[in-house]
Amino acid sequence: MKTIIEPFKIKMVEQLRFTTREEREELLQLAHYNPFLLHSDDVLIDLLTDSGTTAMSAKQWSALMDGDEAYAGSRSYYKFEKVVQDITGFKHVIPTHQGRAAERILFSLVGGVGKIIPNNTHFDTTRANIEDSGAAAVDLPDPLGIRPEVIADFKGGMDVDALEALIFQARPANVPLVMLTVTNNTGGGQPVSMRNIREVSRIAHSHGIPFFLDACRFAENAMFIKLREKGYADVPVKKIAQEMFSYADGCTMSTKKDGLVNTGGFLAMNDDALAMKARNVLIVTEGFTTYGGLARRDLEAIAIGLVEVLDESYLAYRLRSVQYLGDALEAQGVPIMRPTGGHAVYLDAKRFAPHIPVSEYPGQSIVCALYEQAGIRSVEVGSVMFGKYDSNGSLLPSPMELVRLAIPRRVYTQSHIDYVAEAVCEVYVDRDHLPGLRIAYEPPVLRHFTSHFERICKPVPALHVVGSNRVAMTNGVR
Ligand SMILES: *Cc1c(COP(=O)(O)O)cnc(C)c1O
């Protein structure tokens, strides 16, 4: 059988709310052309993020009822700890309310002025927590990882020569930790090979530096290793995950991703002294060591999610369903980042809308058009998110202008994804009419979340707007 099906059936459904194109045009204007400012009730298919948007299983929902809400020593904590230890092999497991809380605790202990933390590509909260401690966050991506058009199996890894050079230059004493993010989220959800994990670990350890994984998407990464790396085709994915963690001394994780739950995270490690310090910070900032800012029932759901995520039929479906959207878009000539990663498809806005200069945010223009066209919410990952200004106030653009279509886990069916592909293709056909945008208001940091935009010119209606296709689209009933 060639068809890979959803390895689950649906027990509970959540109603979608349809809007008309006219309503969406008005709603988007009211949201200042920034879909972060839309109400989710006005969104039909929400591809803003795969974080915390998972559909939990019947087993997870029933486990919530079994949560032991004791403040200290909860039975639910010990279940959670056992599962995390089984997968990661780490001695100390410290629950946190989400991934960035684990980062905050870790870097408040090992960061600080003069310290340098290398990573393949730091996620934005990781970078923010490192910089907040006074340390410097340095990205050392594989050179292939920043070329969207190049097809390669493992574009998410770290440039190991650059790592050697950086440690040599900075001196090992100033590098408290080497980190590797699996999969490389900011770099397009591209996987990291076992070979690269092993190499980075070897280099770090040869200088006496601890090595940590940012393990948010460890299971998707392990499945890519099974499918693509020589020698792993017949190894169970759980064993692959265990091997990945075996090279590391600890990890941070947001369970909102491969934990298959809606909130939570953890910090895990082998170092007894560091763990004791981390637990002391945890008690001050998150909560007691056996709940870390979570309801104990959440720990029950995570314990089950971490087992379910390693189910190979789930992972085959997961990677295939992301690739399915990428393939559908490529078949229509839509430029995307290749190959598709584990959790999202990225449109290459520079090639999609070459008539819009980067200073007029082509990615944001596509994001807006997708919402108006079909009620789909996506996010710009380009100069809106990463752009800075020089001393003259001119934009220093991001190296890439992307639009991310992140796929929530176990939420949308194949027909939802077909609908998304159709909508993207329709926007692509009309791409010459996409207007540029200017920023009308922006906050001093993380501007993509709350900026206001204005369209630079009114979009010219395309010729086929009056066709029956568009009428069907408007009602969202395809
Ligand atoms: C989401 C994410 C984080 C932060 O986790 P939160 O739960 O959002 O705080 C850190 N690293 C990576 C790679 C992520 O994707």
Image: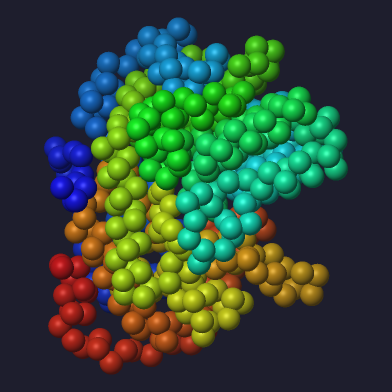
Horizontal placement of 243 versus 460: left or right?
right
Front residue (pair 317, 384): 317
- Figure quadrant of the C terminus: bottom left
Is residue 207 placed above or below 432 in the rendered structure? Answer: above
- Residue 229: where, in percent of width, then height? 45, 42
- Residue 375: where, in percent of width, then height? 30, 66
Would you identify the image quadrant in which residue 219 lies? top left
Would you identify the image quadrant in which residue 267 lies? top right
Residue shown at 63% from the left, 45% from the top: 158
Front residue (pair 103, 214): 214
Residue shown at 67% from the left, 58% from the top: 444
Count of marks placed on residues: 0
Q: Is residue 280 visible to the viewer in this orientation of the structure?
A: no
- Residue 316: where, in percent of width, then height? 30, 43
Horizontal placement of 216 versus 309: left or right?
right
Horizontal placement of 228 versus 11: left or right?
right
Horizontal placement of 111 versus 211: left or right?
right
- Residue 38: where, in percent of width, then height? 39, 60
Residue shown at 27% from the left, 16% from the top: 66
Is residue 117 placed above or below 308 in the rendered structure? Answer: below
Front residue (pair 351, 313): 313
